Amino acid sequence: MTTEKIDGVSVSTQASVYFDGKCVSHGITFPDGTKKSVGVVLPATLTFNTGAPEIMECVAGSCEYRLDGTDTWLTSQPGEQFSIPGNSKFDIRVTEAYHYICHFG
Ligand SMILES: O=P(O)(O)O[C@H]1O[C@H](CO)[C@@H](O)[C@H]1O
Ligand SMILES: Nc1ncnc2[nH]cnc12
């Protein structure tokens, strides 16, 4: 079961574009002020830095990810999620567009 819609939020209409467009996301804000982002990563191998701790929730497609300090590539499929510590980084390898919700803070 994947999160196909998020109701009752405001959308930041200007996208965040990373890595020459290989990652594009829009911020959303809930009525209580909680912020998340909804985005897509196109096929590429990238390194994401984190500020706040994050949970990456896959809503479509898939990715492989490797947490900082590990050598293991793990897969995340629709309905699955993975956590990343704050002030860290992770490698992400995408071969089919990876659609996600980023829960952070
Ligand atoms: O907006 P995306 O690309 O998902 O980036 C997310 O990752 C950033 C760093 O944690 C967060 O601030 C959140 O904006
Ligand atoms: N840490 C991160 N998490 C999710 N999307 C990102 N885009 C760029 N950095 C990111």
Image: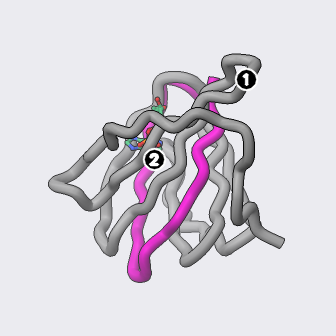
CA gap between label 2 and label 1 equals 30 Å
Which label belongs to residue 31? 1
Other-residue count near label 1 (Cα within 10 Å), few / some / many at <14 / 14–19 / ≥20: few
Vertical comparison of 34 with 71: above or below: above
Q: Tell me where the magenta segment starts and ends, as one range.
A: 85-105
Q: Secondary structure at mark 1?
A: loop
Q: How many marks?
A: 2
**Ligand 2 in which quarter:** top left
State yes or no: residue 56 in magenta.
Answer: no
Q: Circle 2 is placed at which residue position?
A: 90
Query: Which of the image's four quarters has the N terminus?
Result: bottom right
Q: Examine the image and state in which quarter residue 33 appears.
A: top right
Q: Nearer the viewer, residue 87 or 81?
A: 81
**Residue 21 position in % (x across, y down):** 22, 57
Q: Nearer the viewer, residue 90 or 1?
A: 1
Q: Amino acid at mark 1?
A: Pro
Which of these two is toward me, 95 or 3? Answer: 3
> On the rendered structure, is 80 left or right of 86?
right
Residue at image coords 73%, 47%: 7
Residue 77 appearing in the image: yes
Q: Is mark 1 within 8 Å of ligand 1?
A: no
Asked whether disc 2 touches disc 1, contact meaning CB atoms under 8 Å apart, the reply is no
Amino acid type at image mark 2: Phe
Residue drawn where x is 66% and y is 74% of the image: 77
In the picture as drawn, the residue positioned furthest to the top comes out as 33
Q: Is mark 2 within 8 Å of ligand 2?
A: yes
